[in-house]
């Protein structure tokens, strides 16, 4: 029986016990860690795509996505404190629902991390070409080198997004020769990001350019645009969800936390609430000063974000300066209201801070690959470690090539939606796994228990499924197509090669420290 192939929980917990970590984190450090992991490309870049889907209703979209993240985070925290090992949702599923479903989760996570890294690369490219090249150096890259092709939702004359390709390959090279960002560097980058966004809020909200009339109509595309349309406040929430992911890194810190039952939920909910309010203030500042109405297509429905039609509209002079048309939304807003220098500094902040997010995402992706090939589900040759640099170089090179290819030819909004499809599936599986483990392993030590799980578990599943069906149709279809490819590989290779299937039970003791999913 396929579902019978379960990775023994006892073996994993025995491994975790051997390397139990010192409990040193309080709720405040955990909250700061969460904020650092979450604030990233989402808010710097997706503000434009979100406004095109929801208009000023973008504020509501942040609240919806943040709320769903909070309940998912509570489920994540229990399982993270029970099974504190590398591999995140993939490992959790393997121990509860068996190999086949674990394979689908691991396969979805590979998609999520790689596509998310591509999205961040494209976001970084917008700030690089806008702030660094145009504004600072006076260099204008020709359109065919700066954006994706028009037919794929790039811009007229676009062919390849060269800066996005360069940054993704550079990060791949750094990962291959071995780099782990130190906590100190990460803290500095978090400070840069938060300072830039705080400056944005203080310059826009009290500005004399701020006009409450810009919020009317508040929901130009309605609250709910209909399943598969990707528009309306809920459609925007499905895209904006990308701006929150990274909180799962907090749940994996449960075993280093003092009094986790109290401090983990404070850290998770505190950081997510902070980010939600922060994001809503940023969105309010952007919409209030330069307006955030979408460009409407036929029938009063907004043109799809990242579509060829929208790109054509944005090339017209009457729309070119709109929020929804900017590749570097926040810097663009500040320039429009007369703070060009500060706008450029915000661009520099994104330029400096976003490559570290690409690095952490690709690191997380290679580690999932690494665990899966160690379990025999992917060829072990893939997890070969370089003799000199001691890194899984084959997996890293393959990942880097895929990330660069997607970043070259797709716009950021489409990439974010595809990444979200994989993420929402993984989060749903985590919620199911938590509920199963309450039944099948009630006595295993949990340093954190999800409160009112009978409500939180089903709410997480419902929230994830609901957001998934509010993604644009093509983003929804990517997941089953990718999954079908994965199943072919599973039955052609993994089913026979699996270590658990062959009766080899080993645990991942010497796996490098896992940093999965820090901050989109």
Image: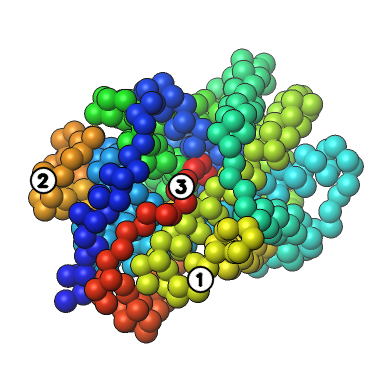
Judging depth in this view, the residue of 320 and 60 nearest the camera is: 60
* Residue 323 drawn at (x, y percent): 64, 39
> Where is residue 155, by image quadrant?
bottom right
Q: Quadrant of the N terminus?
A: bottom left
- Mark 1: which secondary structure? helix
The Cα atoms of the two marked residues, 2 and 1, are separated by 36 Å
Q: Earlier in the sequence, mark 3 or mark 1?
A: 1
* Residue 437 drawn at (x, y percent): 16, 50
Q: Residues within 10 Å of mark 3 (few under 14, many from 20)?
A: few
Residue depicted at x 27% and y 54%: 12
Judging depth in this view, the residue of 24 and 473 nearest the camera is: 24
The residue mark sitting in front, 3 or 2, is 3
The residue mark sitting in front, 2 or 1, is 1
The Cα atoms of the two marked residues, 3 and 2, are separated by 28 Å
Residue depicted at x 49% and y 43%: 518
Q: Earlier in the sequence, mark 3 or mark 2?
A: 2
Which residue is disc 1 drawn over? 382
- Whether residue 417 is visible to the viewer of this picture, yes or no, is no
Image height of 351 relative to 170, above or below: above
Which residue is disc 3 drawn over? 513
- Mark 3: which secondary structure? loop
- Mark 2: which secondary structure? loop
Which residue is disc 2 drawn over? 442
């Amino acid at each position: 029986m396929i579902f019978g192939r379960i990775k023994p929980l006892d073996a994993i917990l025995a491994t975790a016990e051997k390397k139990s970590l010192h409990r040193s984190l309080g709720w405040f450090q955990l909250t700061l860690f969460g904020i650092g992991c979450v604030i990233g490309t989402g808010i710097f870049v997706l503000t434009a795509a979100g406004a095109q889907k929801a208009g000023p209703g973008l504020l509501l979209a942040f609240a919806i996505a943040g709320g769903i993240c909070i309940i998912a985070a509570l489920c994540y925290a229990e399982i993270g404190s029970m099974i504190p090992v590398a591999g995140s949702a993939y490992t959790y599923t393997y121990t509860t629902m068996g190999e086949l479903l674990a394979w689908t989760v691991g396969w979805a996570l590979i998609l999520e991390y790689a596509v998310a890294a591509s999205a961040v690369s494209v976001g970084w490219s917008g700030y690089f070409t806008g702030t660094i090249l145009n504004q600072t150096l006076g260099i204008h890259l020709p359109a065919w080198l700066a954006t994706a092709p028009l037919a794929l939702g790039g811009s007229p004359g676009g062919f390849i997004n060269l800066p996005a390709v360069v940054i993704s390959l550079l990060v791949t090279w750094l990962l291959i020769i071995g780099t782990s960002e130190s906590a100190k560097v990460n803290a500095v980058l978090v400070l840069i990001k938060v300072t830039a966004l705080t400056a944005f809020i203080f310059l826009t909200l009290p500005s004399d350019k701020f006009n409450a009339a810009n919020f009317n109509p508040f929901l130009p595309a309605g609250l709910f645009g209909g399943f598969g349309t990707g528009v309306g406040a809920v459609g925007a929430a499905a895209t904006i969800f990308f701006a929150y992911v990274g909180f799962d890194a907090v749940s994996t810190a449960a075993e280093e936390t003092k009094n986790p039952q109290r401090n983990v939920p404070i850290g998770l909910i505190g950081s997510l609430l902070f980010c939600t309010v922060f994001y809503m203030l940023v969105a309010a500042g952007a919409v209030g000063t330069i307006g955030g109405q979408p460009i409407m297509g036929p029938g009063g429905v907004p043109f799809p974000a990242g579509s060829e039609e929208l790109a054509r509209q944005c090339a017209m002079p009457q729309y070119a300066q709109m929020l929804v048309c900017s590749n570097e939304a926040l810097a663009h807003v500040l320039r429009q209201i007369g703070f060009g220098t500060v706008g450029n500094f915000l661009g520099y902040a994104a330029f400096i801070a976003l490559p570290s997010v690409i690095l952490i995402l690709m690191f997380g992706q290679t580690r999932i690959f690494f665990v899966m090939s160690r379990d025999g589900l992917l060829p072990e040759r893939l997890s070969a470690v370089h003799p000199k640099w001691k890194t899984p170089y084959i997996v890293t090179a393959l990942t880097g090539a895929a990330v660069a290819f997607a970043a070259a030819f797709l716009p950021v909004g489409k990439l974010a939606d595809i990444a979200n499809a994989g993420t929402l599936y993984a989060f749903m599986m985590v919620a199911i796994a938590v509920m199963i483990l309450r039944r099948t392993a009630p006595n295993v030590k949990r340093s954190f228990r999800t409160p009112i799980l009978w409500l939180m578990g089903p709410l997480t599943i419902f929230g994830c499924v609901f957001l998934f069906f509010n993604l644009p149709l093509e983003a929804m279809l990517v997941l089953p197509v990718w999954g079908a490819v994965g199943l072919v590989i599973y039955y052609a290779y993994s089913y026979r090669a699996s270590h658990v299937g062959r009766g080899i039970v080993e645990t991942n003791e010497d796996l490098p420290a896992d940093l999965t999913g820090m901050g989109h």
